[in-house]
Image (cartoon, rainbow, N blue to C red):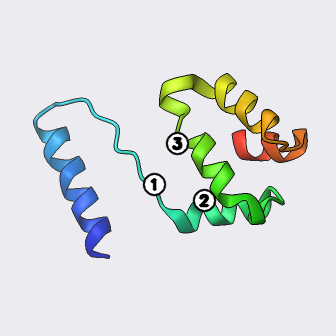
Amino acid sequence: LCEVELIQLFDAVLSELKIPATIKINNRKILAGLAEVAGVAERLTDMTVAIDKLDKIGEDGVVKEMSEKGFDENSIKTIVD
């Protein structure tokens, strides 16, 4: 709960100062759940390594990397969605 309160405080301060910002949250439990739903729980590391590159290589690059690593189309679609 403390971490959530810190994020809320940070958001409130930035909003009050009228500083546009995007707060991104990276949570391994959420990623593990996503991998499970996509049917690739055993490949969590490969999935997260690809997703971590999203800002650098974009969605198409992430999809390409996951395809090259052998993820099937349905799993990739679930992850991207």
- Residue 81 visible in this rendered orientation of the protein: no
Under tag 2, what secondary structure?
A: helix
User: Callout 2: few (<14), some (14-19), or many (20+) C-alpha neighbours within 10 Å?
Assistant: some
> In percent of the image, x 66 and y 32: which residue is there?
62
The answer to whether the residue labelled 1 contacts the one labelled 2, judged by CB atoms less than 8 Å apart, is yes
Query: Dot 2 corresponds to which residue?
Result: 31
Query: Dot 3 corresponds to which residue?
Result: 52
Number of on-image labels: 3
Coordinates of residue 53 in the picture (x, y in percent): 53, 35
Q: Which label's residue is closer to the chain start, 1 or 2?
A: 1
| Viewer-closest of 69 and 47 | 69
Amino acid identity at mark 3? Asp
Amino acid identity at mark 2? Leu
User: Callout 1: few (<14), some (14-19), or many (20+) C-alpha neighbours within 10 Å?
Assistant: few
The answer to whether the residue labelled 2 contacts the one labelled 3, judged by CB atoms less than 8 Å apart, is no
Q: Which label's residue is closer to the chain start, 2 or 3?
A: 2
Closer to viewer: mark 2 or mark 3: 3
* Label 3 – label 1 distance at C-alpha: 9 Å
User: The N terminus is located in which quarter?
Assistant: bottom left
| Up/down of 21 relative to 27, above or below | above
Query: Dot 1 corresponds to which residue?
Result: 26
User: The C terminus is located in which quarter?
Assistant: top right
Under tag 1, what secondary structure?
A: loop
> In percent of the image, x 68 and y 23: which residue is there?
60
